[in-house]
Image (cartoon, grey):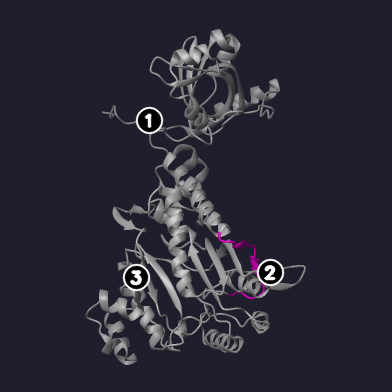
């Protein structure tokens, strides 16, 4: 016996055929896809301005409105119909009756479909249930929707389908729309803070003859007219520091980067970073300013600096903790002591025991970093700066005056993932040239993520880069944290996907 609670499958092909037939009729009447309707009001603004008014006030003081949006709900009741439309700000109800629009217009409206886009004019009133509603006097079909929307109570339930058809996800899911509204607020708050501190916003090349500014495998393309190989940028760093050389002493870019690497809940090959640089500052200044940036972002998105991510609290209002790489390992892995951390053979033996892959050519500093990333990184839930990075894994950072084997570099970890990276910039052109050469040697030995030698950047340094600090913040990961999103794909409108 058939289960009476089972919803029969939707015959999408039949619905599309029916809607195409309706569109054909509209074309014959010359009414398909008009573009002369002018919307004057948004649902959210009307609600904010008039929701508190009582029904009598709205009748005694008529308010004419012009609204437009997508039909999300519709109820037909003989000589009158109710519909709910959705615009960029929210939803508002329409009341369409034969007395207000006439029999022909009402009959046409009854044949409109969920998903159609309409424009309506009329006056505001309140229903018996107290819902702010537009009493429609004129209504027009502006765009005929040919495909049915998903079932209204569930929207898109398949996660991959949500990513592939983000346009439908945005129509159906208010939570999805809010994530991207919050993303826009976060970026705007960050931009406003930087501009208020007299940072200049710049744009640097996305196609570069030499990929630089990070250790990553680039995407490669070809420019036909110049007959030359180009790379999609992996970071804007070296170009932004060229600008500091040129006199733009405080500069930033909110940029798209491209790295030909694996994909995960934290990695997308195309992603957004903030990078900023300030002359006459160092890594200490940067750490304080990064904290200010994240607090401003949290206030813009959440209205508070105490947030919750995946059920666990994060307090951004307090000064962030600081640990060295070795200090963090000893704190979270007390079975690994200084005797192991400071002996290359012993640390390799322990990594083999733990089945942690590593690069045979790495020195002690590189091995310590690999061990940290494999055993400790995921434990750093509360905001924590990891400092004192080895010079061998920091080819663009200034060496520490106290210990030249270390650099004045930090990485910020929150909720078990890297959020930011920054350092006092290396402005010694001879030291930078030698470090580039070491990167070239690593690339020749088979490291696809090692940096290229950038002769023009060395030339720029030879003109003189003032003492400088620079940092990068992963915008996508910040948005993940502040919108409680488990995957980076949830905060990128169109994440990279395999072809259907």
Q: Check residue 211 for magenta coloring.
A: yes
Disc assigned to residue 222: 2
Q: Which type of secondary structure does the marked residue at label 2 adopt?
A: strand
In this view, 78 is above or below 257: above
Residue 141 position (above or below residue 485): above
Q: Residues within 10 Å of mark 3 (few under 14, many from 20)?
A: many
Considering only order in the chain, which callout, 3 or 2, is on the residue closer to the N terminus? 2
Mark 2 vs mark 3, foreground winner is 3
Q: Quick one: label 2, few (<14), some, or many (20+) residues within 10 Å?
A: few
Q: Which residue is mark 3?
A: 377
Residue 498 position within the rendered picture, expressed as x and y whole percent measured from the top left = 50, 57
Q: Are marks 2 and 3 in contact (CB under 8 Å)?
A: no
Q: Residue at x 48, y 28 (%)?
A: 47
SS of the residue under disc 1: loop
Q: Nearer the viewer, mark 3 or mark 1?
A: 3
Q: Nearer the viewer, residue 466 or 425?
A: 466
Residue marked by disc 1: 8
The crowding category of the residue bearing disc 1, from other C-alpha atoms within 10 Å (few below 14, some 14 to 19, many at least 20), is: few
Q: Quadrant of residue 333?
A: bottom left
Q: Which residues are magenta?
A: 197-212
In the image, residue 359 lies in the stretch drawn in magenta = no
Residue 495 appears anywhere in the view: yes
Residue found 55% across the figure and 56% down from its top: 191
- Mark closer to the chain start, 1 or 2: 1
Which secondary structure class fits the magenta region best?
loop
Marks 2 and 3, how far apart at CA: 38 Å
| Label at residue 68 | none
């Amino acid at each position: 016996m058939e289960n009476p609670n089972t919803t029969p499958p939707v015959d999408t092909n039949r619905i599309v055929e029916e809607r195409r037939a309706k569109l054909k009729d509209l074309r014959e009447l010359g009414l398909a896809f008009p573009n002369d309707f002018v919307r004057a009001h948004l649902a959210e603004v009307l609600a904010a301005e008039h929701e508190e008014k009582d029904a009598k006030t709205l009748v005694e003081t008529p308010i004419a409105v012009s609204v437009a949006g997508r039909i999300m709900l519709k109820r037909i009741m003989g000589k009158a119909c109710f519909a709910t439309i959705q615009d960029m700000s929210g939803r508002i109800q329409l009341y369409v009756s034969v007395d207000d629009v006439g029999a022909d217009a009402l009959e046409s409206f009854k044949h409109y479909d969920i998903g159609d886009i309409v424009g309506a004019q009329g006056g505001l009133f309140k229903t018996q249930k107290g819902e702010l509603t537009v009493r429609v006097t004129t209504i027009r079909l502006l765009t005929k929707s040919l495909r049915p929307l998903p079932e209204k109570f569930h929207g898109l339930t398949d996660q991959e389908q949500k990513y592939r058809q983000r346009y439908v996800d945005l129509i159906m899911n208010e939570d999805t729309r809010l994530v991207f509204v919050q993303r826009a607020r976060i970026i705007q708050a960050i931009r406003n803070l930087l501009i208020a501190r007299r940072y200049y916003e710049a744009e640097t090349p996305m196609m570069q003859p030499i990929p630089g500014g990070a250790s990553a495998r680039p995407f490669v393309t070809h420019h036909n007219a110049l007959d030359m190989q180009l790379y999609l940028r992996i970071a804007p760093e070296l170009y932004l520091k060229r600008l500091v050389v040129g006199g733009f002493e405080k500069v930033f870019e909110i940029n798209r980067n491209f790295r030909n690497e694996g994909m995960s809940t934290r990695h997308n090959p195309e992603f957004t970073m903030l990078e900023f640089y300030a002359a006459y500052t160092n890594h200490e200044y940067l750490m304080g300013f990064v904290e200010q940036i994240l607090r401003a972002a949290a206030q813009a998105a959440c209205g508070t600096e105490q947030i919750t991510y995946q059920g666990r609290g994060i307090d951004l209002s307090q000064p962030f903790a600081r640990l060295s790489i070795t200090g963090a390992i000893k704190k979270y892995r007390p079975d690994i002591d200084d005797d192991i951390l400071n002996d290359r053979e012993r640390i390799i033996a322990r990594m083999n025991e733990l089945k942690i892959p590593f690069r045979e050519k790495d020195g002690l500093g590189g091995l310590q970093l690999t061990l940290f990333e494999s055993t400790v990184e995921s434990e750093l839930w509360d905001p924590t700066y990891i400092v004192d990075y080895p010079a061998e894994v920091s080819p663009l950072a200034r060496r520490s005056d106290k210990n030249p084997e270390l650099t004045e570099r930090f990485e910020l970890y929150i909720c078990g993932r890297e959020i930011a990276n920054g350092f006092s910039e290396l402005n010694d052109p001879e030291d930078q040239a030698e470090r580039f050469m070491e990167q070239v040697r690593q690339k020749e030995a088979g490291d696809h993520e090692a940096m290229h030698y950038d002769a023009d950047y060395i030339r720029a340094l030879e003109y003189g880069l003032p003492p400088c600090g620079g940092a990068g913040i992963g915008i996508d990961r910040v948005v993940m944290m502040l919108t409680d999103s488990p995957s980076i794909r949830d905060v990128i409108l169109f994440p990279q996907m395999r072809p259907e």
